[in-house]
């Protein structure tokens, strides 16, 4: 068994988590594009429908990029931020912080590659309850949200107290 420690271990963790998150996201988007028709809704669970849509902008379709120069600017910003988060993950002090940042980087990378290839980000998961529908999103957004939750958990006062006392908390 190969044991990686130090920088190599951190890099392997970040690359593994981010790479897996991006790959799973891109495969799911390809399946959604092949299986769903834009605008058609397929029931999946009582609170989740599958509904193919395309996002030309950033979160909640803000700042849509319909022309090549806007798309290039959006890709430059998105790529830069993805690299910064991945670098932050490499420098992270704790495992939970590193895992959260790697999940965020992986989700961001999935959306970046999707936008780079197609010019848009593919969304297909549609949450709803009763008559209320929320936004449509994809697995990259799930990875990013999961990463944020992990960062919040890492910042809880109980975890900070244990870390400062030298107790081993993953």
Image (cartoon, rainbow, N blue to C red):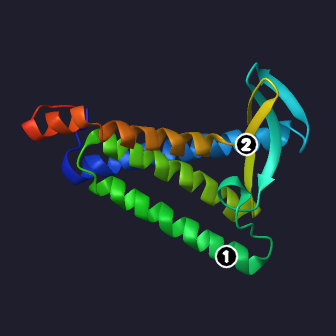
The image shows residue 103 at horizontal and vertical percentages of 46, 44
Residue 133 placement, left or right of 145: right
Residue 46 placement, left or right of 11: right
Seen as rendered, the residue at the extreme top is 46
- Of residues 106 and 51, the one nearer the viewer is 51
Occupied quadrant, residue 73: bottom right
- Look at the picture and state if 9 lies above or below 126: below
Seen as rendered, the residue at the extreme bottom is 69
Give the number of marks.
Answer: 2
The 10 Å Cα crowd at callout 2, few under 14, some 14 to 19, many 20 or more, is few
Residue at the image point whose x is 61% and y is 59% from the top:
112
User: Which residue is labeled 1 in the image?
Assistant: 72
Helix, strand or loop at label 2? It is: strand
Gap between marks 2 and 1 measured at Cα? 25 Å
- Look at the picture and state if 121 lies above or below 81: above
Helix, strand or loop at label 1? It is: helix
- Of residues 107 and 130, the one nearer the viewer is 130
Q: Is residue 170 visible?
A: no
Residue at the image point whose x is 8% and y is 36% from the top:
165
Quarter of the image with the C terminus is top left
The image shows residue 125 at horizontal and vertical percentages of 73, 36
């Amino acid at each position: 068994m190969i044991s990686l420690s130090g920088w190599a271990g951190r890099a392997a963790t970040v690359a593994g988590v981010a790479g897996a998150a991006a790959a799973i996201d891109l495969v799911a988007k390809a399946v959604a594009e092949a299986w769903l028709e834009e605008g058609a809704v397929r029931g999946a669970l009582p609170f989740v429908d599958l509904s193919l849509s395309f996002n030309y902008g950033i979160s909640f379709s803000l700042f849509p990029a319909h022309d090549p120069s806007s798309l290039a600017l959006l890709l430059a910003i998105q790529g830069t931020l993805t690299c910064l988060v991945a670098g932050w993950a490499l420098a992270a002090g704790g495992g939970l912080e590193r895992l959260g940042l790697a999940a965020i980087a992986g989700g961001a990378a999935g959306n970046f590659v999707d936008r780079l290839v197609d010019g848009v980000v593919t969304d297909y998961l549609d949450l709803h309850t009763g008559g209320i529908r929320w936004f449509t999103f994809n697995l990259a957004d799930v990875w990013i949200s999961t990463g944020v939750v992990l960062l919040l958990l890492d910042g809880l006062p109980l975890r900070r107290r244990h870390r400062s006392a030298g107790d081993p908390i993953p």
